[in-house]
Image: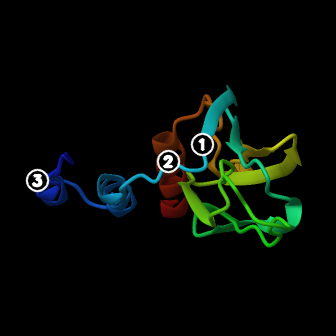
Amino acid sequence: MRTVFDLSPLHRASIGFDRVFELLETASRTQGDNWPPFDSVKLSDDQYRITMAVAGFTRDDLQISVQDNVLTVNGERHVDHAGEVLHRGIANRPFTRSFELADHMQVVSANLQDGLLVIDLKRDIPEALKPRRIAIGTESPRGADVRRLESQAA
């Protein structure tokens, strides 16, 4: 059973949070195909790792892309077994798995080893958006304006 959230009260009481509302609505609509399985891990304040189990897929079978803050991993196996398959226990179906990324998230690397696709991400906030310390002066701006006006009147 799926829970439906009514976000209309939030729309009435806030401005500029459209991206947050879109994320909430997308998350509530997403019916999960939980394949392939994955882990997401926070390594530090600004570093993350996604590890996906993609047994049987080669580098050529996988495609990773980022567009509009969405990381998308596509997989489609192109090689089939020679001979008659008596039992197929290893998933062979194509997949698409998407992850919404926060602003300023960058994919640092992607590696495939032992059937695991490891994608490392890092938040890289531009210097202009980082908090900065403002020096406090000793002269009052109001006092400076008053002196300037007095000198102009004389």
Q: Secondary structure at mark 1?
A: loop
Q: Secondary structure at mark 2?
A: loop
Would you name the residue on which mark 2 appears?
Answer: 34
Residue 35 x/y as whole percent: 55, 50
Check if mark 1's residue and mark 3's residue have beta carbons within 8 Å. Answer: no
The answer to which image quadrant residue 75 occupies is bottom right
Which coloring applies here?
Answer: rainbow
Q: Amino acid at mark 1?
A: Pro
Residue 138 x/y as whole percent: 61, 28
Q: Check the picture and name the quadrant holding the N terminus.
A: top left
Vertical placement of residue 78 versus 34, above or below: below
Residue 49 x/y as whole percent: 71, 38
Q: Nearer the viewer, residue 9 or 13?
A: 9
Would you name the residue on which mark 3 appears?
Answer: 9
Check if mark 2's residue and mark 3's residue have beta carbons within 8 Å. Answer: no
Using residue 136 as the reference point, say whether residue 149 is left or right of it. Answer: left
Q: Residues within 10 Å of mark 2 (few under 14, many from 20)?
A: few
Q: Nearer the viewer, mark 2 or mark 3?
A: 2
Q: Secondary structure at mark 3?
A: helix
Q: CA distance from mark 1 to mark 3?
A: 35 Å
Q: Earlier in the sequence, mark 1 or mark 3?
A: 3
Q: Nearer the viewer, residue 39 or 47?
A: 39
Would you name the residue on which mark 1 appears?
Answer: 37
Using residue 89 as the reference point, say whether residue 144 is left or right of it. Answer: left
Q: CA distance from mark 2 to mark 1?
A: 6 Å
Check if mark 2's residue and mark 1's residue have beta carbons within 8 Å. Answer: yes
Q: Amino acid at mark 2?
A: Asn
Name the residue: 13% across, 53% down.
6
Residue 92 x/y as whole percent: 67, 61
Q: Residues within 10 Å of mark 1 (few under 14, many from 20)?
A: few
Name the residue: 12% across, 58% down.
8
Res. 44 in view: no
